[in-house]
Image: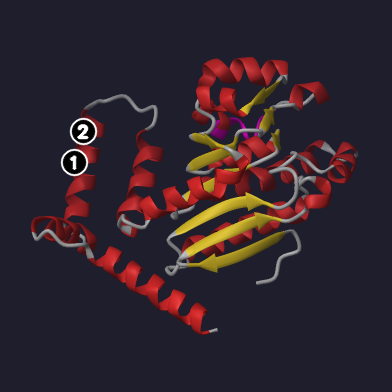
Amino acid sequence: MNYETLEINISHRVAVLWLARETVRNAFNETSIAELTQAFETLGRDEGIRAIVLAAKGPAFCAGADLAWMKRMAGFSHDENRADAMKLATMLRTVYECPKPVLARVHGDAYAGGIGLLAACDIAVAAHDASFCLSETKLGLIPATIGPYVIRAMGSHYARRYFLTAEKFDAGEAYRIGLIHDIAPAEELDGKVNELLGALMLTSANAVTEAKRLVRDLAGRPIDDSIVADTAERIAQVRVTEDGREGVRSFLEKRKPRWVAEYEAMVAAEDGEDEEM
């Protein structure tokens, strides 16, 4: 599928999804929101994809809402605004619930909705010189649709500060409060992302999907009888899957599990084809 606002490159079972509205610092509009929703739905269903990297062209990761889009919204009725906001909320949920691991590669500015987008990803890595701002209150607005994801990432304690003050903060602070998982010099950012992808390729695709669901379902729940029974049932189900049985067998037999051997063979074959070309 061809996109107006995105570019997608697939290699070695990794899809790199580039935000490609660099002239407006990758700000959201109706088209980019719809295309992000469609892209993550499509990639999430693709059995040939093991991981997704969300990256951005140009000087910024994402500057939030596009000014032209905001001007149009200013004239919307309440019902029109709600319908428009639901599209953004749906896109963020699609990223958050994507069955594939999603890594955000953050550089430059990540403002407002851009922070919501990276917070909806599973892992976020930022360049040392990246900057962040939940700027909504400066505009008389609130970070509502992105709120569930940002609060899960940085916690309510820090959300109270940065939601209210709309202060800019740097990558070091974003790391300290848990919004991002790691930071690296700009020239080493791709290396850090590749390091994480390498770790993911040693895992079972099915186990990763179930582990993502486990985190979503358990976060914030009290440890009671229902959660004890739920987790016991989950591990029982996973143990009898093909990957569960293969993983245990390969460990006991001191060999690589099937998915690692298959991935290594695929990479070797693809690299060989590239050399011939």
Residue 177 seen by the camera: no
**Furthest-bottom residue in this view:** 276
Taking 77 as reference, is 55 left or right? left
Residue 72, position as x, y percentages in the image: 89, 44
Q: Secondary structure at mark 2?
A: helix
Which residue is at 86% across, 41% downward?
A: 67
Which residue is at 50% across, 84% downward?
A: 276
Q: Are marks 1 and 2 in contact (CB under 8 Å)?
A: yes
Taking 139 as reference, is 40 above or below it? below
Q: Which mark is residue 232?
A: 1
Residue 117, position as x, y percentages in the image: 62, 42
The residue identified by callout 2 is 228
Taking 136 as reference, is 276 left or right? left
Report the magenta residues as a range: 143-149
State which quarter of the image contains the C terminus. Answer: bottom right
Name the foreground residue: 261 vs 91: 261
Which image quarter: residue 243? bottom left
Residue 171, position as x, y percentages in the image: 60, 29
- Structure colour scheme: secondary structure
Which image quarter: residue 32? bottom right
Check if residue 133 falls in the magenta segment: no
Name the foreground residue: 75 vs 220: 220
